[in-house]
Image: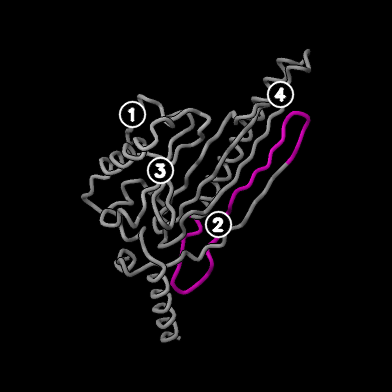
Amino acid sequence: MDKLNSSETCIYNLLYTQFNEDFGRDTYFSYNLQFPTFYSLKNPYFYVSSAILTNINSTIKSDVYAFKKGLLEEEQDYNEATSEDKLLKKSYKVTSTYAVTFNKNHILSTILSLIAFSGESLPTYNELNNYNFDLLTGNPIMIKDIFNKGVNYTQLITDYLRYKISQNKDNYYEDVVIDIPDDQAFYITDTGLVIYFGVDEIAPAEYGIPKFKMSFEKFAPYISPRFYCSPSNMFSNARKISRSSSKNR
């Protein structure tokens, strides 16, 4: 574990990501759902408890189908209420897509986009779920975990977001207040921490989901090395592991 926290260590998680897709169409309701399932590959130096991955997989799948169920019920309620006037009926469409944004050092960050339309040009619902997990413990990663101990991360993030908003004031509400709670929405990428807000939370709905990226390179002194590591470190570490495995054979 000590080596894992070293700035010289950077390894890819050996996970297999299965692509799942479920789709269908009815008279007034259609859906196209995509979501991942993760499996650990057997190898001499990387291990993840199957219980941890089962929990992650079931959580993501449950969120996808709960979203679909909610929209299906909304469609049925609305169209049943307008059963006598076919001109008022609406067609509902639900989609989900995903991306694995960070998959290193026993850390997994995945995002799930959930979008629904109800006969309108703009989405009726536009949500972005994040799943940030420590694969060693199975615990969710909180935004404070991204930073080194002792860093006033809330002030650091707040100042940066205020600065970015000030550069494009017209894209945000005039009286917007930036407050970073413990459960602030975010996801992790290889190059930075992405902080985001809900639709219509700090900007008009037509702008979608506001996102702000804090570059790991720019904020390197504040970032835990477990999250910020370079490709050269990954290559170097892979060679060390390969040599070590050869000696033990």
Contact? badges 2 and 4 (CB < 8 Å): no
**Residue 168 sits in quarter:** top left
**Closer to the camera: disc 2 or disc 4?**
4
Name the residue tied to disc 4.
90
Name the residue tied to disc 1.
177
Residue 199: x and y in percent read: 49, 31
- Secondary element under disc 2, as helix, strand or loop, is strand
Between disc 1 and disc 4, whose residue precedes? 4
Residue 90 falls within the magenta-colored stretch: no
Name the residue tied to disc 3.
212
Residue 43 falls within the magenta-colored stretch: yes
The kind of residue tagged 3 is: Phe
**Closer to the camera: disc 3 or disc 4?**
3
**Closer to the camera: disc 1 or disc 4?**
1
Identify the residue at image location x=31%, y=47%: 144
Between disc 2 and disc 4, whose residue precedes? 2
Query: Which image quadrant: the N terminus?
Result: bottom left
